[in-house]
Image: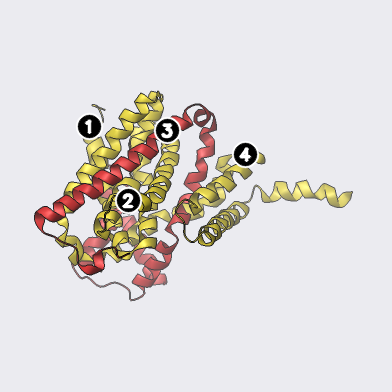
Chain colours: A red, B yellow
């Protein structure tokens, strides 16, 4: 547990350092994610409990967004005026992005014949 | 009477402590989570939205500034960093799947990401949103820290962007299942990937709740969308 937590923080720190050193417009945690994914792709060793620690942390990923979501109260006046326009934009634009994303993915699956295995398909 | 008069003092004391707001953040989320489970995991009953509504009302009702709340809530907020790094783990057990779907992923990434950005600009302008709000809305589909950085670069309000990002995540998490069911998408990879592109971390959290494969593809999509949008905005910042 302790070792795995250290690994996560160490990769976040490395990501942050790389980002600052190379003046990349990408936050440290995302670079840390890319570094850890590469590390695992190259099959370098990691603490044994790594998987358990990660899934414990990710199980309640939504909780971690609560403080930022609560921050909306700082913009109450603006939201009273144009909140409906912003909300409608978010709803329509997100719906469109979902459809376009899923549709292009499926079309490209057909084109490249990368058909899903039975495990990768939704069964009713 | 003396007992009654101590109550405000206790409140004054507690409401300035990080511990109080940290505990309440967890409590509010637990309430949201219980309601979500009681509804049979119905996506409209979103735990993040419920928690933010409860906490926001409490802060407004007690005239507590957000900054004071955040002194406690920051401990939860901080974990977003390590959690983002931890997304690499579920990814690694599915490298084969990801490699197989590389072309669909890259094309869907650019198509979905461009749709999210440009449709938001067009729709918000048509509805008469102010320029500041439109610019805050542009990075709405990207994970919070990247989105806030982008908003700052292009003349939006980072804290407004944070809220819009969360709203986008919640909307995507709510809409995705009925929408893609109705349209007949059965491939978990496509469903998860589209959700990660459109609705970043909250979408990813939702995808993992529904199906592991969807979750993995959502995580990849979120990371790639963050990388691509950050680079694109850095290149196009003057032009936007």
Question: Which chain letter matches label 4?
Answer: B
Looking at the rendered structure, whether the residues under marks 4 and 2 are on a common chain is answered as yes
**Chain-order first, disc 2 or disc 1:** 2
**Circle 4 — which element?**
helix
**Circle 1 — which element?**
helix
Label placed on residue B60: 4
Q: CA separation, marks 4 and 3?
A: 21 Å
- Against B28, residue A83 (above or below) is above
Q: Residues within 10 Å of mark 2 (few under 14, many from 20)?
A: few
Which residue, given by chain and number where applicable, does mark 2 sit on? B182
Looking at the rendered structure, whether the residues under marks 1 and 4 are on a common chain is answered as yes
Question: Which chain letter matches label 2?
Answer: B
Q: Nearer the viewer, mark 2 or mark 1?
A: 2
Which residue, given by chain and number where applicable, does mark 3 sit on? A86
State the residue in front, A52 or B81. Answer: A52
Which residue, given by chain and number where applicable, does mark 1 sit on? B236
Question: Which chain letter matches label 1?
Answer: B
């Amino acid at each position: 547990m302790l070792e795995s937590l250290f690994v996560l923080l160490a990769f976040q720190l490395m990501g942050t350092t790389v980002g600052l050193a190379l003046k990349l417009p990408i936050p440290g945690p995302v670079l840390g994610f890319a570094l850890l994914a590469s590390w695992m792709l190259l099959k370098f060793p990691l603490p044994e409990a790594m998987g358990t620690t990660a899934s414990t942390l990710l199980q309640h990923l939504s909780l971690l967004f609560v403080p930022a979501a609560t921050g909306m109260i700082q913009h109450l006046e603006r939201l009273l005026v144009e909140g409906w326009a912003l909300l409608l934009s978010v709803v329509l634009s997100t719906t469109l992005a979902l459809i376009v994303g899923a549709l292009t993915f499926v079309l490209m699956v057909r084109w490249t014949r990368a058909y899903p295995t039975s495990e990768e398909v939704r069964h009713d | 009477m003396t007992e009654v008069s101590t109550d405000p003092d206790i409140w004054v004391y507690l409401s300035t402590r990080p511990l109080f707001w940290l505990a309440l953040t967890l409590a509010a989320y637990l309430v949201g989570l219980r309601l979500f489970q009681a509804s049979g995991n119905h996506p409209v009953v979103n735990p993040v939205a419920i928690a933010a509504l409860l906490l926001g009302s409490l802060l407004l009702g007690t005239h507590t500034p957000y900054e004071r709340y955040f002194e406690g809530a920051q401990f939860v907020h901080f974990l977003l960093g390590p959690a983002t790094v931890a997304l690499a783990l579920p990814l690694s057990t599915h490298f084969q799947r990801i490699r197989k779907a590389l072309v669909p992923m890259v094309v869907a990434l650019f198509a979905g990401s461009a749709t999210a950005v440009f449709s938001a600009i067009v729709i918000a302008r048509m509805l008469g949103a102010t320029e500041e709000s439109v610019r805050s809305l542009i990075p709405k589909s990207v994970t919070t820290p990247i989105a806030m950085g982008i908003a700052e670069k292009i003349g939006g309000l980072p804290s407004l962007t944070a809220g819009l990002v969360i709203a986008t995540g919640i909307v995507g998490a709510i809409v995705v299942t009925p929408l893609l069911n109705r349209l007949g998408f059965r491939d978990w990879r496509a469903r998860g990937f589209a959700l990660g592109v459109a609705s970043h971390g909250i979408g990813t959290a939702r995808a993992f709740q529904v199906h592991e494969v969807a979750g993995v593809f959502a995580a990849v999509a979120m990371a790639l969308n963050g990388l691509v949008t950050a680079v694109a905005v850095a290149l196009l910042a003057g032009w936007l």
